[in-house]
Image (cartoon, helix red, strand yellow):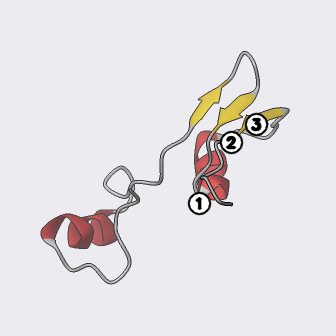
Amino acid sequence: MPIPRPLCQCRVCREAREKGYPFRRTGPSLFLHDQNLLIDTPADIAAQFNREGIHTLKNIMLRLRDGL
């Protein structure tokens, strides 16, 4: 779950807004550099790629929810 959560005013979310990275967390994903493979992707994947300096993506694996 990304932190800070929208509209949340708990201590953890307030601290993440004030201090930024590494207190600010994005959604879960896994990038395998040797395979150039992204496994799963949150909505904020662009910010993660920019932060980590990833400029190329060749393969992606997604799990689709039932009914989508």
Image vertical order of residue 51 relative to residue 14, above or below = above
Image vertical order of residue 54 relative to residue 13, above or below = above
Using the image, tell me which numbered label, if any, was put on residue 60: 3
Tell me which label, 1 or 3, sits earlier in the chain: 1
Q: Residue furthest front?
A: 67
Asked if residue 23 lies left or right of residue 54, the reply is left
Q: Position of residue 65 (x, y in %)?
A: 60, 52
At a point 21% along the width and 80% down the height, the residue shown is: 9
Kind of residue indicated by mark 1:
Asp
Using the image, tell me which numbered label, if any, was put on residue 62: 2
Asked if residue 4 lies left or right of residue 42, the reply is left
How far apart are the two marked residues, 1 and 3, measured between alpha carbons?
15 Å
Instruction: Name the residue that disc number 1 marks.
Output: 44
Q: Position of residue 37 (x, y in %)?
A: 73, 28
Kind of residue indicated by mark 2:
Leu
Contact? badges 2 and 3 (CB < 8 Å) = yes
Kind of residue indicated by mark 3:
Ile
At a point 72% along the width and 15% down the height, the residue shown is: 34
Q: Position of residue 55 (x, y in %)?
A: 78, 41
How far apart are the two marked residues, 2 and 1, measured between alpha carbons?
15 Å
How far apart are the two marked residues, 2 and 3, measured between alpha carbons?
7 Å
How packed mark 1 is, by other alpha carbons closer than 10 Å (few <14, some 14-19, many 20 or more), is: few
At a point 65% along the width and 59% down the height, the residue shown is: 67
Q: Position of residue 54 (x, y in %)?
A: 71, 38
Image vertical order of residue 39 relative to residue 27, above or below = above
Contact? badges 1 and 3 (CB < 8 Å) = no
Image vertical order of residue 19 relative to residue 27, above or below = below
Quarter of the image containing the N terminus? bottom left
At a point 37% along the width and 62% down the height, the residue shown is: 20
13 or 50, nearer to the observer: 13
